[in-house]
Amino acid sequence: MKIKLACPLQQDSIVDGEGIRTVIWTQGCAHKCQGCHNPQTHDFNKGYEIDIEDIKKAILQLNKQDGITLSGGDPFFQAEASKEIAKFCKEQGLSVWAYTGFTYERLSEMMEYRKDIRGLMENIDVLIDGKFEQDERSLNLKFRGSKNQRVIDVKESMQNGCTVEIEKYNQENNYIGYDELAKEKEYLYI
Ligand code: SF4
């Protein structure tokens, strides 16, 4: 099975979820959010194809990573392939975060008739959902760009049949400034 990526795997991110993470930038997104930071990832005809087995090999080579983050683009437009990656990462003990322009509620509806989306959701720990809304943009948010987006505990949400947000991330003014990020990174690499 293949997946379309926008660029190679990016290691050592500290802004795409908790801890030190490897980001997998999928290619293709139809949400067309105004002010999107990654417009080059929208076109489904661009990017490049890579075999999932090669991604698995790259994941096995990762060093000092807490988890992976599926971003893009929107990984839910390649749900089956994204599921395979997420499942493999979970088997390796890595946490899985994912960004999507769909809301959790919309994905829940789709899970009823899309096995690939259900399978992907079952292998995600934390989901940042919803389109980027320029009017809701704030720099005082952690791991998200606009206030309408939520940081969701997927397992809890699926078990309880409702959207369970992770409060410590969803409050405003908990943004880590660049100085703190630099210190955090330096500390972790000592
Ligand atoms: S969902 Fe993400 S990648 Fe897609 S248009 Fe919106 S901000 Fe950009």
Image: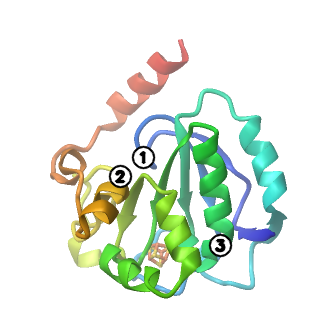
Left-right relation of 142 to 5: left
Examine the rendered structure and indicate whether residue 189 appears above or below residue 132. Answer: above
Q: CA distance from mark 1 to mark 2?
A: 6 Å
Residue 138 vs residue 72, the one in the foreground: 72
Q: Circle 2 sits in a helix, a strand or a loop, which is it?
A: loop
* Of labels 2 and 3, the one closer to you: 3
Q: Which kind of residue does numbered mark 2 sit on?
A: Phe
| Apparent side of residue 129 relative to residue 100 in the rendered image (left or right) | left
Please give the name of the residue rendered at 30% of the width and 38% of the height, measured from the top-left corner. Answer: 177
Q: Amino acid at mark 1?
A: Gly
Question: Which quadrant of the rendered structure holds the N terminus?
Answer: bottom right
Q: Judging from the image, what secondary structure is the residue with disc 3 in?
A: helix
Residue hosting label 2:
143
Which residue lies at the image location 50% right of the left edge and 72% below the top edge?
A: 118
Near-viewer residue (182 or 125): 125
66 or 41, nearer to the observer: 66
Callouts 1 and 2 close, C-beta under 8 Å = yes
Label 1 SS = loop
| Rendering colour mode | rainbow
Q: Relative to 168, does residue 164 appear above or below in the rendering?
A: below
- For marks 1 and 2 on the same chain, the one whose residue lies earlier in the sequence: 1
Q: Position of residue 176 (x, y in %)?
A: 29, 38
Amino acid marked by disc 3:
Glu
Q: Which mark is residue 17?
A: 1
Q: Does the rendering let one see residue 81? A: yes
Query: Ligand 1 near label 3 (Cβ, under 8 Å)?
Result: no
